[in-house]
Image: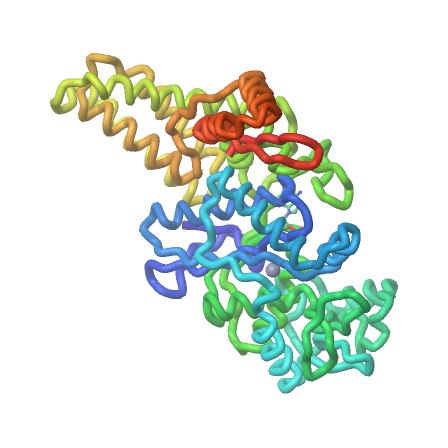
Amino acid sequence: MKIFNTLTRRKDEFVPLEPGKVKMYVCGPTVYNYIHIGNARPMIVFDTVRRYFEYKGYEVNYVSNFTDVDDKIIKKAIEEGVDADTISKRYIAECKKDMEGMNVKPATTHPLATEEICGMLEMIQSLIDKGYAYKAEDGTVYFRVKAFKEYGKLSHKNLDDLQSGFREIKVTGEEGKEDSADFVLWKPKKDGEPFWESPWCNGRPGWHIECSVMSRKYLGEQIDIHAGGEDLIFPHHENEIAQSEAANGKTFANYWMHNAFLNIDNKKMSKSLGNFFTVREISEKYDLQVLRFFMLSAHYRSPLNFSAELMEASKNGLERILNCVSRLNDFLKTAADGGMTEAETAAKAELDSLVAKYEAAMDDDFNTADAISAIFEMVKLANSTASEGSSQAWLKTVKDTIEKLCDVMGIITEKKEEMLDSEIEEMIAARQQARKEKNFALADEIRGKLLEKGIVLEDTREGVKWRRA
Ligand code: AMP
Ligand code: ZN
């Protein structure tokens, strides 16, 4: 298997640290709002990477954090008059619902920054002891970038250029730095902010240290793959390397994988630009499988522009696969036992070569776009060879193959009976009426029926909201 490695800037052959095992860490979201579909791209992409490793027989230890202490969380908490913990807990729960909807497997471990402060204090202290970090007068602890000789190796930046670039940017509160390129490991608390005691000052961690600490705790000092969106290459991942390699004296991760952006009108989708759709919004219009299929229709290192047309195309493409599997299931109900005919044996050989094509695409840096093309070719083959008169052996082989390869993409091939928006609205209105009449048993029954069809209701201050689970 070949993986494009940001560190070496080429496709490297994958050699695991331990045979048959993959240790991977994927930087997770900062939880202060619903995740947007840009955040969903790394989740879907790296879940697919994980699934493909599992398909190949590897045991994957997959760690992905939630950043639950951050300026944006604190700001939101102040706006709502609640504590930061309430905000982060709420959006972690919402994020997990979205992940489930997108069929993203839960990580082996989902650590939270606020629960790993002890480990951070320990790593920061060891960096100070080794001369890689220092405390400024106000209690801020900085990483001493020039002490780490390989700084810049991931982002392919030169320290001199970085220093002159940073000299232009003066960050308030960071006047105590020895050098403009140094970055914060620990900072003093401000009024009203959550804080922890430390040997340097009451305060909270900088953003980068959490991943170095969690990765080491849950995966060990050395890991196979570290991943995230390409905006994380610098400074986040560069700083993670500096922290981890300075603290552990070992190569941190052997392969660095980065997904390109999900764009809208060719601009990065982001909360700060306000040009985003949340996964929740999309779930009101589409089954989230469509979103997943759309994300995988492009190679993960190519920018992907979000548009209604592409979503429609993905919906149709997905439908084609689901219809095919559903027909195969129907034929199987009545198919007589028996082996393959000669023609079916020939079709099986063709199917095998398509499986090889799929695997070759995935082995080549997870080219899901080409892998999906191979699935479409299998669908075409199934549609042209399977019928009521087909042998059970052939029907089962082709169906199982398509299902297995779709599962690697995280696509569930079982067809859900979709309810139309208008039908849902009608049932919600009936439930509201029942509630008005204090017939709560009926109201609950309607809610239950909707849930069976995969429709989740949420009673909010603005009225009843629904989404597809
Ligand atoms: P954040 O919550 O901003 O730290 O982002 C969580 C993850 O989503 C990181 O891996 C980001 O790189 C990734 N990400 C954020 N916006 C986009 C986007 N528009 N396209 C692709 N990945 C993104
Ligand atoms: Zn990280």
Q: Position of residue 64 (x, y in %)?
A: 53, 56
- Residue in the image at 79% along x and 65% along y: 192
Quick check: 30 left or right of 79? left
Q: Is residue 387 visible?
A: yes
- For ligand 2, which image quadrant applies? bottom right
- Residue in the image at 33% along x and 36% along y: 404
Query: What colouring does the structure picture have?
Result: rainbow
- Residue in the image at 62% along x and 49% along y: 91
Rendered position, 323 above or below 246: above
Q: Position of residue 454 (x, y in %)?
A: 47, 30
Q: Tag count in the figure?
A: 0
Q: Residue furthest front?
A: 438
- Residue in the image at 59% along x and 23% along y: 437
Q: Position of residue 469 (x, y in %)?
A: 51, 34
Q: Is residue 285 visible?
A: no
Q: Residue furthest left?
A: 338
Quick check: 296 left or right of 155? left
Quick check: 128 left or right of 292? right
Rendered position, 244 above or below 154: below
Nearest the viewer among 138 and 362 is 138
- Quarter of the rendering containing residue 426: top right
Q: Position of residue 304 (x, y in %)?
A: 62, 36
